[in-house]
Image: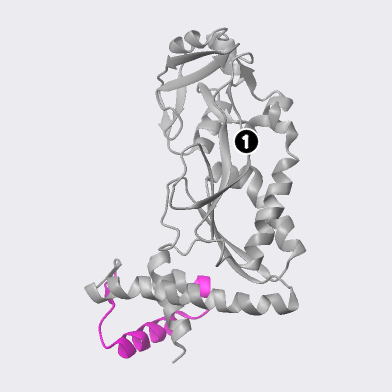
Amino acid sequence: MDRLTAARVFVEVLERGSQTAAAEALDMSRAMVSRYLAELEGWAGVRLLHRSTRKLSLTAAGEQMLPQCREMLALAERMQALGQGVDAVPRGTLRITCSQSFAQAWLVHALHDFTSRYPQVNIDLLIGSEAVNLVEARIDLALRITNQLDPNLIARHLAVCRSVVCAAPAYLARQGTPQHPQDLTRHNCLAYAYFGRSLWEFAHQGEATAVSVSGSLSANESMVLLEATLAGAGVSLQPLYSVEALLREGRLVQLLPDYRSPELGIHALYGSRRQMLPAMRLLLDFLAERLASKAHWRY
């Protein structure tokens, strides 16, 4: 039995939630996935999964086996990386996690250019704003927009994220245009769960102002709020990378331009410099260089 492949199948089944999804991700038949799972259980001498028609769940032995399999796969990747120093050709799969808004507005385009330059590198992109355990999830790189960094991870500052208050022209025609942050208390403010759901902060001429806002919609994904804002539902605080083009096109209007929202750092987070794959070193430098050129995000 190819135990490394069996370990990869086991991990994929748990991460994808089903044998069918794992089979698609691994480009193998569902029967082959079942065979690898059965052989892994035979080798381990215990049952690793509870199988039912509705869901899969780990047995007690499976819970102990899962982190070991992930470590085995990580070790295999590091061993493969040793040979990359010989031919200097970056290769392998990089697992990256990132928020939907940043991935959709910017990252996916940068990754396309990167993989075009290095065709032997593949990217597995996990979308989500929630913090994840990089080791347990086998994540090589987390791109996060925050000023609160995990002290257990290595962080490389890549750029600054600026945000603006904006609304659609149709909404402003109905409700009027706020001239001061306190005017926002009379508007339908669409709140982002991870960025001051009910308290929006501003700075003007060195003075700080905080405004308690409320509205008919809040969400944990800023792209949802952006669509609602474009539809004229209300006012939202959006990262500039998502709305810069919309502001230029006139589909959105920047409000309170003299009042700045707090800036957040765009960071690359990872677990170890010593065990970093060569492909990831190249990707980090590539992203840093590409982000450094985004001066138009200073709208």
Where is residue 237? Give x, y as percent: 53, 26
Residue at the image point whose x is 69% and y is 70% from the top: 90
Is 266 or 113 nearer to us in this picture? 266
Which amino acid type is shown beneath numbered disc 1?
A: Val
Quadrant for the C terminus in the image: top right
- The picture quadrant where one finds residue 45 is bottom left
Is 195 or 154 nearer to us in this picture? 154
Q: Is residue 299 above or below residue 182?
A: below
Residue at the image point whose x is 61% and y is 75% from the top: 81
Asked whether, in this view, residue 96 is left or right of residue 241, the answer is left
Name the main secondary structure of what is drawn in magenta.
Answer: helix
Which residue has dot 1 on it?
160
Residue at the image point whose x is 51% and y is 72% from the top: 24
Q: Is residue 27 visible?
A: no
Q: Is residue 155 visible?
A: yes
- Most extreme residue toward the bottom is 1
Q: For the magenta stretch, what is the residue range?
A: 24-53
Q: Is residue 50 magenta?
A: yes
